[in-house]
Image: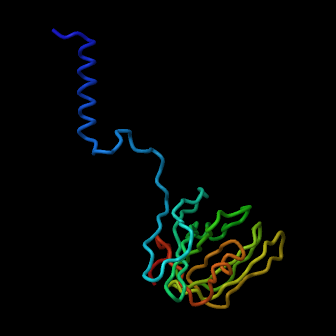
């Protein structure tokens, strides 16, 4: 005959044995974290010398409705610098852009992806921070780089690259100068927001 106290001790002993059997040596029996995984991961670096860039595997703070990705700024020697980016790939997202933000985290920006080649420019209405913008082709080649200043009221200047482009990358003003980005570099994003050409 068993008593309730003995049943509990036996059940507890069985539970400990089962957990120990399912846990690898050195592995904790604690449950996995319930925090969501970051929405961005750094893609493998392309061949070439390693960059001196900071790691860019931390997720950006949520900014609904935008998703996030990792952009690689790749120079002529195939060295890459990672950059966390918000993705604006829907018309309403592209229209909103970085309006009404007071700052961007270090090594971050916003990529604007268009379904086909686009002509025309960007403006800075209701954008509070100075930005630099790189316009790029469907293959990621940087076509033009411009610096833009905030605009508090109409009429606001239109920043037009004068070429057809498939995407644009906005970052805090001066960032492209700091890393040396210029036409001829390549911008790659993972996951890629650009439709196949």
Instruction: In the rendered view, tell whether residue 187 sits above or below residue 7.
Output: below
Q: Residue at x 57, y 84 (%)?
A: 136
| Quadrant of image for the N terminus | top left
What percent of the width, then of the height, locates residue 19?
28, 36
What percent of the width, then of the height, locates residue 18?
24, 34
Whether residue 157 sits left or right of residue 80 in the image: it is right
Q: Residue at x 51, y 82 (%)?
A: 79
The image quadrant that residue 63 belongs to is: bottom right
Q: Residue at x 66, y 73 (%)?
A: 171
Whether residue 36 sits left or right of residue 103 in the image: it is left
Q: How many marks?
A: 0
Whether residue 11 sits left or right of residue 30 in the image: it is left
Front-most of residues 154 and 192: 192
Front-most of residues 171 and 125: 171
What percent of the width, then of the height, locates residue 75?
54, 85
What percent of the width, then of the height, locates residue 179?
63, 79
């Amino acid at each position: 005959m068993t008593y309730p106290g003995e049943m509990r001790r036996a059940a507890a002993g069985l539970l400990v044995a089962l957990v120990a059997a399912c846990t690898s040596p050195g592995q904790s029996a604690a449950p996995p974290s319930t925090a969501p995984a970051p929405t961005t991961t750094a893609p493998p670096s392309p061949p070439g010398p390693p960059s001196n860039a900071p790691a860019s595997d931390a997720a950006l703070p949520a900014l609904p409705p935008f998703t996030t990705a990792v952009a690689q700024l790749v120079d002529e020697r195939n060295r890459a610098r990672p950059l966390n980016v918000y993705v604006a790939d829907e018309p309403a997202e592209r229209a909103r852009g970085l309006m009404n933000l007071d700052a961007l985290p270090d090594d971050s920006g916003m990529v604007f992806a268009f379904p086909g080649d686009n002509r025309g420019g960007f403006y800075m209405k209701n954008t509070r921070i100075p930005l630099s913008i790189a316009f790029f082709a469907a293959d990621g080649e940087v076509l033009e780089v411009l610096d833009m200043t905030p605009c508090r009221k109409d009429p606001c200047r239109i920043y037009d690259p004068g070429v057809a482009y498939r995407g644009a990358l906005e970052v805090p003003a001066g960032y492209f100068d700091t890393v040396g980005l210029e036409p001829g570099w390549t911008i790659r994003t993972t996951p890629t927001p650009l439709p196949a050409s």
